[in-house]
Image (tube, rainbow, N blue to C red):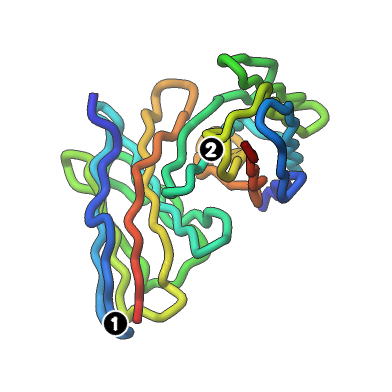
């Protein structure tokens, strides 16, 4: 099956810092999503981004499908950004299960 | 618009018992997905239902089963509970015809097996 690796596994930053999270995947995908899991376990969809670049406030994401990676940028970090960030991918249409990466645990220190 | 709702929020069982978890998708969504997240680990795909049919299944033993009802809500059953079944069980829903299969997750059901 498809392999999804995320880096770094852990990241500790001061409030106000910027960060870049990376997601590498082993095969062509038709679906890529970024999620944020808060400390209570709730998964929030951040981006649906199988290719290209999107921005939403302080967050932006870029997927280079031909090179099989995606990046999530967080600018001016706030303590509420803490949690685990997952990327998830699926292969061709008709095989719609999302395979999740290993996650990046982000801790923002006041 | 109501999101994906899961019940119960917490469930405590003993080894060998059965657990039933429930999920109501967003109105208009026909697909339901179940994932298991053991403590400190990533999400493992369990089951995918669409239009009442099981479409895909993850690498879990047969004692994990489920179904989808005509109103698209879903139930996950875990028989003969084992200690390692303790986990957060997450349900997600999506619209399959939308062209962009964006999953929306519920808050999860935390199962503890003693």
The front one of A14 and A18 is A14
The answer to which image quadrant residue A74 occupies is: top right
**Which x, y percent locates residue A12?**
71, 44
The front one of A55 and B99 is A55
**Which x, y percent locates residue B114?**
34, 81
Crowding near the residue tagged with mark 1, few <14, some 14–19, many ≥20 C-alpha atoms within 10 Å: some
Residue at point 62%, 36% (across, down): A110
Crowding near the residue tagged with mark 2, few <14, some 14–19, many ≥20 C-alpha atoms within 10 Å: many
Label 1 residue SS = loop
How far apart are the two marked residues, 1 and 2, measured between alpha carbons? 32 Å
Q: Is residue B63 above or below residue A76?
A: below
Q: Is residue A12 above or below residue B66?
A: above
The lab-note entry on whether marks 1 and 2 share a chain reads no
Residue at point 52%, 34% (across, down): A80
Which chain does the numbered disc 1 sit on? B
Which chain does the numbered disc 2 sit on? A
Label 2 residue SS = strand
The reply to whether discs 1 and 2 touch (Cβ–Cβ < 8 Å) is no
For label 1, the residue is: B14
Residue A28 marker: none
Q: Is residue A95 left or right of residue B67?
A: right
Judged from this view, the residue extending furthest toward the bottom is B16
Residue at point 51%, 64% (across, down): B39
Residue A36 marker: 2
The front one of A35 and A69 is A35
**Which x, y percent locates residue A61?**
67, 23
**Which x, y percent locates residue B42?**
57, 55
Residue at point 74%, 31% (across, down): A19
Q: Is residue A107 left or right of residue B90?
A: right
Q: Is residue B2 left or right of residue B36?
A: left
Judged from this view, the residue extending furthest toward the right is A67
């Amino acid at each position: 099956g498809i392999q999804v690796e995320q880096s770094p596994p852990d990241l500790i930053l001061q409030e106000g810092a910027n960060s870049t999270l990376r997601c590498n995947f082993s095969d062509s995908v038709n679906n890529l999503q970024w999620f944020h899991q808060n400390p209570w376990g709730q998964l929030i969809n951040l981006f649906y981004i199988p290719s290209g670049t999107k921005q939403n406030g302080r967050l932006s994401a870029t997927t280079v499908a031909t090179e099989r990676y995606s990046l999530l940028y967080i600018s001016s970090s706030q303590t509420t950004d803490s949690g685990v960030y997952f990327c998830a991918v699926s292969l061709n249409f008709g095989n719609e299960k999302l395979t999740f990466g290993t996650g990046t645990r982000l801790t923002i220190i006041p | 618009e109501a999101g994906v709702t899961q019940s119960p929020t917490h469930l405590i069982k003993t080894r060998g018992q059965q657990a039933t978890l429930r999920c109501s998708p967003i109105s208009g969504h026909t697909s339901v997905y179940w994932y298991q997240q053991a403590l400190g680990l990533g999400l493992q795909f369990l089951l995918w239902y669409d239009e009442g049919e099981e479409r895909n299944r993850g690498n879990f033993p047969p004692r994990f089963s489920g179904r989808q009802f005509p109103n698209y809500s879903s139930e996950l059953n875990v028989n003969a509970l084992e200690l390692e079944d303790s986990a957060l069980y997450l349900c997600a829903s999506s619209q399959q015809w939308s062209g962009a299969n964006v999953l929306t997750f519920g808050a999860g059901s935390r199962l503890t097996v003693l």
